[in-house]
Image (spheres, helix red, strand yellow):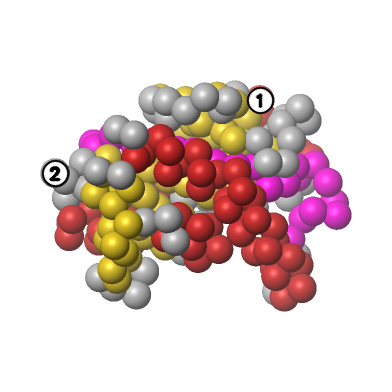
């Protein structure tokens, strides 16, 4: 059985999934193999941003020939009604100037379904937030489009947990080079993935 490739950007996002794997074993500095239920899986920490996601995702795809790719991790809400801790299942991706690319959402109960804006820079202003929302996106993240390119036609799912109101709250905007804010964000991301996202992801993948 070919594995599913589960991909998160940061170790604080992938660790809660790693500790739920059965018989995990490292096969590289960023890549683990194991299983969830009867499903063999590979778990990749790709790094932040579309370029890293595409490059490292492609390396994993060429090495493992996965059946399916899953992009998971945190996202920023682009709509006021989408609260921290909500789970978002992507129905499509918008990026750059390209038209929306449809995706099949994960078959998991309780998700907020909608398109994701897959961006190369943090959405840090109300103007940028409104522009992506006007294109139909409910949330934004930075890796799914890179993984879509790396998938080379394989099915791609995206499952995210809301960590902040992207561009909507000046107190939540990360300042480049601010180590205190980055540590706070990583702690928040770890908590959200551990409590909200990882249980839903593991339940979905392991029951297939």
Residue picked out by circle 2: 1
When asked about the image quadrant of residue 145, the answer is top left
Name the side, left or right, on which 169 lies relative to 186: right
Q: Judging from the image, what secondary structure is the residue with disc 2 in?
A: loop
Dot 1 corresponds to which residue? Answer: 134
Q: Residue at x 28, y 68 (%)?
A: 25
The front one of 155 and 192 is 192
Is 148 included in the stretch rendered in magenta? Answer: yes
In reply to whether residue 43 is colored magenta, the answer given is: no
Q: Which residues are magenta?
A: 147-174
The residue sitting at 78% across, 30% down in the picture is 80
Q: Is disc 1 surrounded by few (<14), some (14 to 19) or many (20+) residues within 10 Å?
A: few
Residue at the location (80% across, 42% down)?
Answer: 168
Q: Earlier in the sequence, mark 1 or mark 2?
A: 2
Residue 109 position, x and y percent, is 52, 24
Q: Residue 7 location in percent, x, y? A: 40, 53
Q: Quadrant of residue 144?
A: top left
């Amino acid at each position: 059985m070919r594995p599913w490739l589960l991909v998160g950007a940061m170790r604080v996002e992938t660790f809660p999934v790693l500790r739920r794997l059965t018989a995990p074993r490292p096969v590289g500095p960023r890549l683990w193999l194991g299983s969830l239920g009867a499903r063999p899986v590979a778990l990749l920490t790709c790094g932040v941003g579309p370029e890293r996601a595409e490059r490292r995702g492609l390396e994993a795809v060429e090495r493992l020939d996965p059946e399916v790719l899953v992009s998971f991790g945190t996202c920023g809400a682009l709509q006021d009604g989408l609260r921290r801790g909500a789970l978002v299942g992507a129905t499509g991706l918008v990026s750059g100037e390209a038209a929306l690319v449809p995706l099949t959402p994960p078959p998991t109960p309780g998700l907020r379904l909608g398109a994701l804006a897959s961006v190369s820079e943090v959405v840090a202003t109300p103007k940028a937030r409104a522009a992506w929302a006007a294109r139909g996106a409910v949330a934004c993240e930075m890796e799914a489009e890179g993984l879509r390119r790396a998938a080379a036609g394989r099915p791609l799912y995206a499952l995210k947990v809301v960590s902040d109101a992207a561009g909507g709250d000046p107190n939540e905007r990360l300042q480049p080079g601010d180590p205190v804010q980055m540590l706070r964000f990583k702690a928040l991301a770890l908590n959200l993935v551990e409590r909200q996202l990882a249980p839903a992801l593991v339940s979905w993948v392991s029951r297939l």
